[in-house]
Image (cartoon, grey):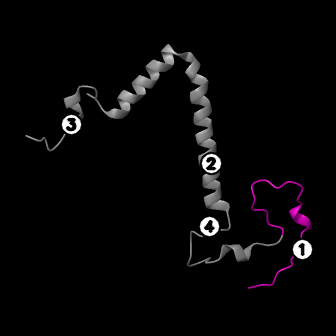
Amino acid sequence: MIPTKISWVQFGRFKSSRSATMLSTVGRQLRNHPALIPLFIFIGGGCTMSLTYLARLGLRNPDVCWDKTNNPEPWNKLGPNDQYKFFAVNMDYSKLKKDRPDF
């Protein structure tokens, strides 16, 4: 007979929810191996910074258009001295002049 539904209780490893078991396993490993703590800190910091930069790209970049009815082409409303790049080396955006036509 082939079982139609396999539950985690059959295997005996996961008697409670999966996340609680995983967190308790990680906590136990951190207590036994304290050298893993900096690894978790740096990986968590890297994940946080990458998600923050991704959110900044989605919210501040002129190439992304969230509202197509009110502002269908947001890149046309940028002035020549608007800085939308995250980091600009040797570039002063306040001194740039308009050298393109209006649409």
Instruction: Decide which of tag 3 and tag 4 comes sooner along the chain.
Output: 3
Q: Which residue is mark 2?
A: 52
Residue 24 is situated, as x and y percent measured from the top left of the image, at: 40, 24
Amino acid at dot 4: Val
The secondary structure making up most of the magenta span is: loop
Amino acid at dot 1: Lys
Amino acid at dot 3: Ser
**Residue 52 is a magenta residue:** no
Magenta segment, which residues? 81-103
Label 1 SS: loop
How far apart marks 1 and 2 lie (CA) works out to: 32 Å
Q: Callout 3: 10 Å neighbours few (<14), some, many (20+)?
A: few
Instruction: Decide which of tag 4 and tag 1 comes sooner along the chain.
Output: 4
Q: Which residue is mark 1?
A: 97
Instruction: Decide which of tag 1 and tag 2 comes sooner along the chain.
Output: 2
Q: Which residue is mark 4?
A: 64
Q: Quadrant of residue 46?
A: top right
Q: Callout 1: 10 Å neighbours few (<14), some, many (20+)?
A: few
Contact (Cβ within 8 Å) of mark 1 with mark 2 = no
